[in-house]
């Protein structure tokens, strides 16, 4: 009957294959031109001592990162995307808030690039893990300073701050003269 739907069953066997029309040969070109330059992973660790950060390389070796030029080579920039920290303070500070911070540039100048906070537990400890989509950029020659404080006021002195920064080195964009 006209206008009535009918089920269609297609059986494609080797004895009775479904006929197809040849479509020609497809050409496939693979182009290896990434939109971003290659990235070199970087892990920096600070374990509370005033010496600052050390770089932990992929082979497990440790490299001094105390001087800014040891962290970010000329012509490169470091993009930090992950910040993990652990603070251990005085038990008497339990219940207060503590702030972990990263400052880039000379002390007293430059910018605060990261702030994270948490409430201190009954032992006076706190931890944080921050995984940022965009992160922050450290340029060649720029110092990285990490610190912490407890508020309101900090009557029991400073605790120890351990911090791990994860990111990657990538070529710095070339500046065009104006």
Image: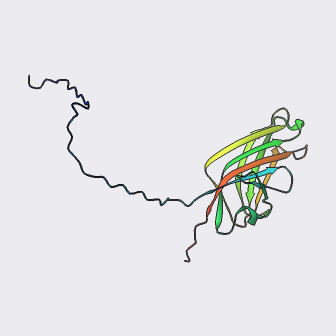
Q: Position of residue 63 (x, y in %)?
A: 78, 58
Residue 103 sits in which quadrant? bottom right
User: As rendered, which of 106 and 38 lies closer to the eye?
Assistant: 38
User: As rendered, which of 114 and 32 lies closer to the eye?
Assistant: 32
Q: Position of residue 35 (x, y in %)?
A: 49, 59
> What colour scheme was applied to this rendering of the protein?
rainbow
Query: Of all residues shown, which one is farthest toward the front?
Result: 15
Residue 143 sits in which quadrant? bottom right
* Left or right position of 2 against 14: left
* Left or right position of 24 against 169: left
User: As rendered, which of 144 and 122 lies closer to the eye?
Assistant: 144
Residue at horizontal 78 percent and vertical 59 percent from the top: 65
Residue at horizontal 20 percent and vertical 26 percent from the top: 8
User: As rendered, which of 26 and 73 lies closer to the eye?
Assistant: 26
Query: Of all residues shown, which one is farthest toward the bottom?
Result: 177
Residue at horizontal 70 percent and vertical 48 percent from the top: 83
Q: Is residue 159 above or below residue 6?
A: below
Query: Of all residues shown, which one is farthest toward the left?
Result: 1
Q: Position of residue 57 (x, y in %)?
A: 73, 54
Residue at horizontal 84 percent and vertical 35 percent from the top: 94
The quadrant of the rendering that contains the C terminus is: bottom right
* Left or right position of 47 against 77: right
The quadrant of the rendering that contains the N terminus is: top left
Q: Position of residue 115 (x, y in %)?
A: 72, 49
Circle count? 0
């Amino acid at each position: 009957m006209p206008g009535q739907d009918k089920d269609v069953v297609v059986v494609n066997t080797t004895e009775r294959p479904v006929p197809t029309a040849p479509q020609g040969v497809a050409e496939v070109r693979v182009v290896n031109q990434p939109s971003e330059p290659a990235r070199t992973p970087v892990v920096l660790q600070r374990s509370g001592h005033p010496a600052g950060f050390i770089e932990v390389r992929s082979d497990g070796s440790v490299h001094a990162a105390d001087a800014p030029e040891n962290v970010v080579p000329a012509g490169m920039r470091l993009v930090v995307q992950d910040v993990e920290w652990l603070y251990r303070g005085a038990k008497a500070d339990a219940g207060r808030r503590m702030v972990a911070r990263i400052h880039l540039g000379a002390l007293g100048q430059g910018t605060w690039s990261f702030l994270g906070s948490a409430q201190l537990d009954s032992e006076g400890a706190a931890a944080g893990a921050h995984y940022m989509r965009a992160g922050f950029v450290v340029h060649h020659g720029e110092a990285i300073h990490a610190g912490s404080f407890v508020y309101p006021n900090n009557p029991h002195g400073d605790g120890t701050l351990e911090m791990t920064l994860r990111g990657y080195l990538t070529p710095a964009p070339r500046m065009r003269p104006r």
